[in-house]
Image (spheres, rainbow, N blue to C red):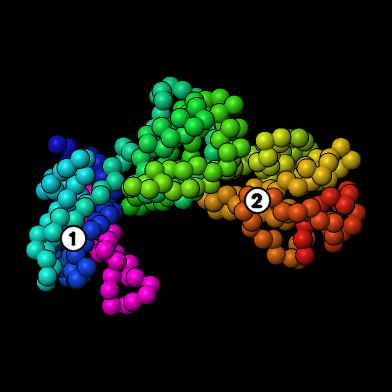
Amino acid sequence: MDESFEIFARKVFVGGLPIDVTEDEITSTFSQFGPVLVDWPRRPDSARYMTGYVFLVFEDERSVQLLVSRCHKEDEKYYLFVSSPTMRDKPVQVRPWRLNDMEFMLREDMPLNPRRTIFIGGVPRPTKARELASVLDHLYGSVCYVGIDIDPELKYPKGAARVTFTTEQSFIAAISGRFVHIPHADMSKRVEIKPYVIDEQMCDECEGIQCAGRYAPYFCGDVTCLQYYCESCWDFYHYGEQSDERKASHKPLVRIGDQTKLLAHPPHHNHSSNNKVISTATAAVDCCRHIDTTTCFAVRCSQHY
């Protein structure tokens, strides 16, 4: 085995611990594989007792390889024996994250269209890219790529994923569905689907003419739009004379850091009030109350005060 070749993330989940095991005992058990930091969340209702799981962060990825090699494997799961004051040699589950599980590609040479890509947050961390591809392909069809977002240092899943579809039809079916249930342990978790918002995109309507060549700050995720807009074009196409009440109810998606947020109304409408982040449920349409009334196209803006 090439010891320089990384197979696992340095962060490892360990579950099913004896309830009375101490942090020193955990450290003693797992430090035999190499220097390790124990991250053990406390239960919110008591400072005395800990949760039955921990995260281990090893200094060297080779320690994880050694740990896995010493585990007992059963039904594709890894177990190691851990003792506590009241329990001896209890099998606890060791759940390493394999780096080759973070991506799925239908074909290596297949071009990926970012405009057919969705973003899913709240993905259970054990979920493999291939498993997520299988779920979404079964529901909507034509999945060609899945990428699990990982922490750049530890290379452990962050709980989010990007999925690209081969066809526009599958992409629209996915964002129209809005939510999907992902199998997790013996249950399933309901997570939200959003269009993936790309950085540094020009306005699809004016191509920068109306905004001095600046990148478009908004993306409209409604299936009747699916376009990037500058501030002027957002107002014209959502509140202008050719618009209607349905278009006026659309909410802008924006990139904030590495996250995509759905806002209650376009921020440029009111620079002095707080712009609330809302769920994808559509808010009621209200009378437009722009500070600068010259920017008001009609009483269709869903801005609330």
- Image quarter in which the N terminus is found: top left
The furthest residue to the front: 186
Q: How crowded is mark 2: few (under 14 residues within 10 Å), some or many (20 or more)?
A: few
Position in image of residue 63 (x %, y %) = 18, 51
Residue displayed at 29% across by 46% down: 97
> Is residue 196 visible in this depiction of the protein?
no
Which SS class for mark 2?
Answer: loop
Q: Tell me which segment is drawn in magenta.
A: 36-61
Residue under the point 88% across and 52% down: 299
Between disc 2 and disc 1, the foreground one is 2
Ranked by sequence position, the earlier of labels 2 and 1 is 1
Q: Which of 22 and 68 is in front in this view?
A: 22
Magenta highlight on residue 291: no
State left or right for residue 49 relative to residue 195.
left
Frontmost residue, 244 versus 23 = 244
Image location (x, y in percent) of residue 90: 13, 59
Question: Identity of the amino acid at label 1?
Answer: Pro
Q: Please say if the residues under marks 2 and 1 sit with CB atoms less than 8 Å apart.
A: no
Residue at the spot x=29%, y=66% of the render? 51
Horizontal side, residue 40 vs residue 215: left or right: left
Residue 219 x/y as whole percent: 67, 43
- Residue type, label 2: Ala
Q: Distance between the residues labelled 2 and 1?
A: 48 Å
- Residue 137 position (above or below residue 286): above
User: Which residue in the structure is indicated by mark 2?
Assistant: 281
Is 145 located above or below residue 192 in the figure?
above
Residue annotated with mark 1: 35
